[in-house]
Amino acid sequence: MRNQNIAARVLNQPLLLEPGYARVFLGALAPRLGIASLQDEFGLIESQEKLRMRADSFGSDRPRNRPYEVLGGVALIPVSGTLVHKFGHLQPYSGMTGYDGIIARVEEALADPTVNGILLDMDTPGGEVAGCFDTARRLNELRGQKPIASISYDMACSAGMALHSATDYRYTTTSARTGSVGVVMMHASFEEQLKANGIDVTLIHSGAFKVDGNPYENLPEQVLARFQAESDRLRNEFAEMVGTHIGLSASDVLATEAAIYTGQDAIEVGFADELINGHDMLAAFSDYIQTTTKIGVSTMTVESKTKPAATAPAPAPEASTEQPDTVDTTKLAADAAATEQARIAGILQCDEAEGRGKLAQHLAFKTTMSVEDAKAALAAAEVPEQSAAAPSGLLSAAMGNTKQPEIAADAEGSEQGGELKGGAKLAAAHAKATGGSNKVH
């Protein structure tokens, strides 16, 4: 048997307990003692597990003790005072709000079916670095399930600005202060006071950096430099995260130099989206939720109309009675040839081809380069040196490089022996030069 000491003090011992409490007490204790069944004169006593199962079966319409207030479907989550890490309280307490409590309340509101949207009511000057960036990033990751907004009702500065930036939509009021994206560190030295009181403090340590920043001596220059470097690193990370959340570059956020902006100025710099009266924040956010919901429904409706049902096969297309358009391939080929001839002529006859015949021929016959691109390439190419006997003009050069048929002055006659004239005489001369037939049809 488990927990024998407890069992010895409970079982087979007289107890002074109110009957109703005794049933609850023993029902909760039974699983720890390994008791499978427990009953009294009124019947079976439910164990703790069964009581929990029964509680889980209660409907959501039962009153529940939420760690936030629900007003018109909006979960209002206050974030006030100094922000601290691992506070252990859900609600703001004693001038502080825990990062852990913020995330716990937001996650519970996301799972609450009575909540349509979440609004963080910000009134904080900031707080600890520890836990801040993780909380802001986690809050940003939770977006998309339900609308999450925040309002700088009084103040959303430094660590508060980190959380403010992580929501879907950011409100501000005319007197609210927002921003201060920066880092501050403090060091207090009691060295002079200790000397005045005749107190000497000896620090015994291992590791060169072990006692950096201790309050018993003034801050050495090298320690100050290390602290400053760490502060700058944190500020850069802070600015990059805020910029990513609100759509600004890290350099734009750094350019604010940790300034604090009031009212409309926060909107101008990009730290807020809308200026409202604080008393209208629930109405304004409710309108935002409805707008977002309508957009989502409209999108889903369009998709459902354009997508066929999964179980309904698509109807077979009817045979078309229309005759397909005929394509005149001969005309297309002729047009293509004319276009190509115009391109070649445009390259060979352009002013830029003068003195660059070989390059022009290469671009005209060996590439598909346009006339304008060919002109640019020719203009950029150097003109090769030409000999004195070189023919002038590109056409002359092309003709000089082409073998011409040798046409004799006294071309032979026809096969019948008669004298050939005109076109027949020219054809006979061509046939003799090329070795072909000289017969004219």
Image (tube, rainbow, N blue to C red):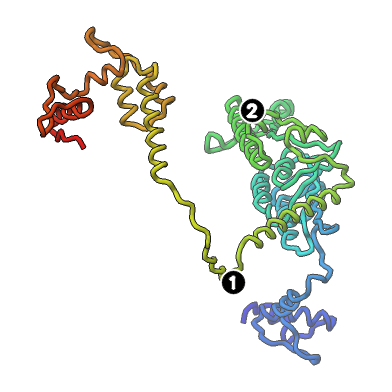
**Residue 142: x and y, percent?**
67, 54
Which of 202 and 428 lies nearest the eye of the viewer?
A: 428
Which label's residue is closer to the chain start, 1 or 2?
2
**Residue 258: x and y, percent?**
71, 31
Mark 2 burial class by Cα count in 10 Å: few <14, some 14-19, many 20+: some
Identify which amino acid the numbered label 2 is placed on: Leu
Left or right of 56 on screen, residue 352: left
Report which residue position mark 2 lands on. Answer: 219
| Residue 269, image quadrant | top right
Disc 2 element: loop
**Residue 401: x and y, percent?**
22, 21
* CA–CA distance in space, label 1 to label 2: 78 Å
| Residue 30, image quadrant | bottom right
Identify which amino acid the numbered label 1 is placed on: Ala
| Residue 439, image quadrant | top left
Vertical relation: 356 (above or below) 107: above
Left or right of 62 on screen, residue 134: left
Vertical relation: 59 (above or below) 126: below
Report which residue position mark 1 lands on. Answer: 312
Left or right of 155 on screen, residue 47: left
